[in-house]
Image: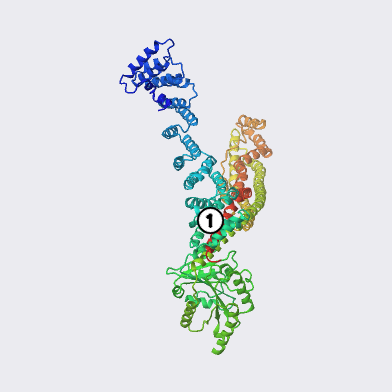
Amino acid sequence: MTFEEQLIKKSYFETYMESGNRTHPVRALGELYLEEQKKDMPDLSYIRFAQGEVYFHNKDYEAAIFKWENITNELEPWAKKNMGDAFLELGLLNSAEELYLSIETESDVLKIESGLQLLSLYIEQGKLDKAVAVIKKFVALDPDYPGVTEIARAFFEEHNDWENAVELAVSEGVRTGSPKWFDVLNQYVDHGHTTVFGPEYFNEALSVLYQVDRSRFEQLAVSLWLSYKGRTNYMAWLKDFNQLFSGMDGNRRDGWTQLSGVYQDAYFELINGDRLIKEISPLIPDLLTNWLKITSPANSLVSASSIIAWNEVFPGSITASAIKDAETLILNSREYHDGYEDSMQLFQMIIKWAEEHEIEVGNRIKWMVQGLNESNVHNLLIAGVSGNGKSSFVNSIVGEELITVPTAAVIRFKNQENPEIHEITDTDVRQITDLEDFKEAAGVSRKTHKHETIIDFKAQFPFIGDHGLALIDTPGVNRNNYDKHPLYNYLRFADSLLFVLNANDPFTEKEREILSNISEYFPNLPIHFLLNKMDVIYSQQEAIEIFDQTWSEISQYYPDAKMFAFSSNYDQAQQLKDFSDFIKSNKRAVDLEQERTSKLQFFVRRAITYLLDKRIEIENNHMESISWNEEMVGKLNGAINQLGDIEEEKSRSIQKSFRKIKDDTRAEIIEKIPGLLRNCSELVTEESDFGRIHEQMDEEMNKRIQEYLDTSVLPKFHDSLEGWIDFSKNEFDQSQNYLNEMAEGFNSMYGEERISLECDFRVLDDWRRDANRMTSGVHYEKVNIMNRSTPQQFFLKSAGKLLGVLPQNNAMLYNRYKTYLETEDYYEIGVSIAKKFLQQFEIFEKSIDRDVNLFFKQPFIELEGAVDHARSEIEYGKNELEKMRINPELYRDPLTLYEVKLRQYEWMTAAGRGE
């Protein structure tokens, strides 16, 4: 045992014990202590140190402390450490801490041992921060010190201090190269304890491990890869790791199965359309190159095709050596049989992406892709020049006279027990309910439709069902549709083509030109011929000659083709039997999976192209919508201003008309009342009671006024109001007619019945009701005519009372009264009566402007609503354009990445086939 080991174990005292001496150490050391004291220059420190150890072991900690307090030799630092241990045992933790911290020594052993004691002290006190600091200090001091790193690891794990635990494992792994520490680190990674560290933190550890143990390197790399996946620093991991791995000499012979798998998953995740190309393009070349370098046999074709596809879409991004290596792998690969499934998944991914962006891929493409899934159905496309009798042949095959006129739609007949017919365009799918509807949808009259139409006709067709066929009938080719005939859009969908010829003039130059175009773009499509209208030929010999001559000419161009003679006038049963034999003889042994995969990949590419074109169309549509709606806002605001002018004009005209009636009535009343009152003079006689005559006259005058108003003014006023209402209705009718024309103009521009400018004619009903109410009778309040306090009336009343009692005065009073009544002005009376009579009509007049406003209210609401809608459309269009122009890559990049994936599947499908 070394000296330091004795000090650690507090067994230094054993150096004073003679071997075989059974004396108790206390006694033995006591005797030595006494002997040492007898010397002239005694050195008691060593013995006292040893005595302290003995007391400590016997739990006499106070005695031990007493012995160690006065140690002044080289053992003093150890004495302090031991005193701290004693205080620790006594539970005097603060005193122990002070002693441990006060130790000054050059001995790493003592530093570590005192540090370990401090560690246990801090743990007991719950001072974990100090405990961590102590651990890091003694690990840094001597990590090879027995048990130090294990103690540190155990502490960190116990207290879930994973950051320090990971740092310890990394540093020890790098320092020692020990697989044990890398295994520990891998455990930490698997439990998610390393994600707080940046990916670059592990570069050195990975580099060391690669040299030590490549199997463990792969395991740790895969664990780290998966731990960063889905996190914000995942891209940083891909960049750092691939840069690191690029400098390593890994190769396919080493069998990197797990790492190759995560490379594959990462690549496909990066190009699934969720990330922008500018984000992933700096990473992909290194990622693909490293993947190819270590790819496993199971996914070598995938990695090699990924390299080729990426470099095709992004030329020059992959090194020439990697390209050459990938090409070699593809050439030596076995056939790949999952191409159809992969391509279908890609198509569904594109459809989903399009739906999320509120874009339709196009119903026709989706319909054809769905048709490719019918692996037990052979799609026979039937085409020919107009007038060659194609429809008669189709009717014979389906067993019904379904096509009676030239068609403008592409019709697919398929056998199905439950009849089902749909009309399909890129933008709509409509169910057809009956045969009349079918003929209407298929007829030439529909050729003016904006969109190419497919009719999917499923019903019980025994012949085509027995032969596993689906007939695709296309419109006849003619000079109007030669360049853009629908036929060319369905050749990729078809499994074979049956071209109909007319026996009268077979295989014309125009037909050869059409077939030449088909063969140029679709060289693998089997083409066969139907020689139709054979019944027009007079003799059987002549028919045979025409058949042979035609076939001889065709075979020069199409040596693999077959030809079938047909006439609608021949025995139908026999012809069906012959055509059945014709079909069976022409069935060739083909790899249906390969052909359908190729067709599907074509439609996937078409869908991508469709969506790329759709973006341009959408952008143009937004610009057109903005421009159109801005124009509409101007027109609508102009219409609102016009409507305001019309309302103002009609309100003014109607009020003016009403005011004239009212003014005429006022003038008539003012004019008539004075005369009516003067005529009351005839009621005065010499026998009148001049004492009360003013009261009698007043009563009579008011009676005549009310009678005049009731019998003359009111009826006439009522008739005038009826005329005024008719006038107003005429004015309103003119306005409504103008607004109807305005609405029709706007609806013509909208292309739909969107604007309705209906006015509220109930206003006229309200006016009629008010007119009847106001002219049905007038509440007349008597007017004080003869009892006013004018000087003349006062004189007459006074004279009547004083003089009227004397008969001889009656003649004088009679003359006076009569003269007064006949000469009185009464103008003010007429004005007052007219004012009261017209008072309710003046209130009504004030409401006319409001009522006219109500009449025009709904058109204003309609036009203002249309303006608001147009402005919201403008705002929406501008916002959408802004988004499209600021980040065009948000739309373009996913489609480009889908193209990369499609190109990869095309390479994989071609592998092993010599293509």
**367 over 37 or under it: above or below:** below
Residue 21 location, quadrant: top left
Residue 511: x and y in percent read 61, 76
**669 over 468 or under it: above or below:** above
The amino acid at mark 1 is Ser
Q: Nearer the viewer, residue 362 or 438?
A: 362
Residue 465: x and y in percent read 45, 73
Left or right of 138, for residue 27: left
**160 over 910 or under it: above or below:** above
Taking the spot 59% from the left edge, 32% from the top edge, the residue there is 691
* Residue annotated with mark 1: 303
Q: What is the crowding at mark 1: few (fewer than 14 residues within 10 Å), some, or many (at least 20)?
A: many
Q: Nearer the viewer, residue 136 or 403?
A: 136
Q: How many marks?
A: 1
**506 over 239 or under it: above or below:** below
Q: Is residue 503 visible?
A: no
Q: Secondary structure at mark 1?
A: helix
Q: Nearer the viewer, residue 873 or 24?
A: 24
Left or right of 651, for residue 227: left
Residue 790 location, quadrant: top right
Taking the spot 60% from the left edge, 64% from the top edge, the residue there is 450
Q: Is residue 632 visible?
A: yes
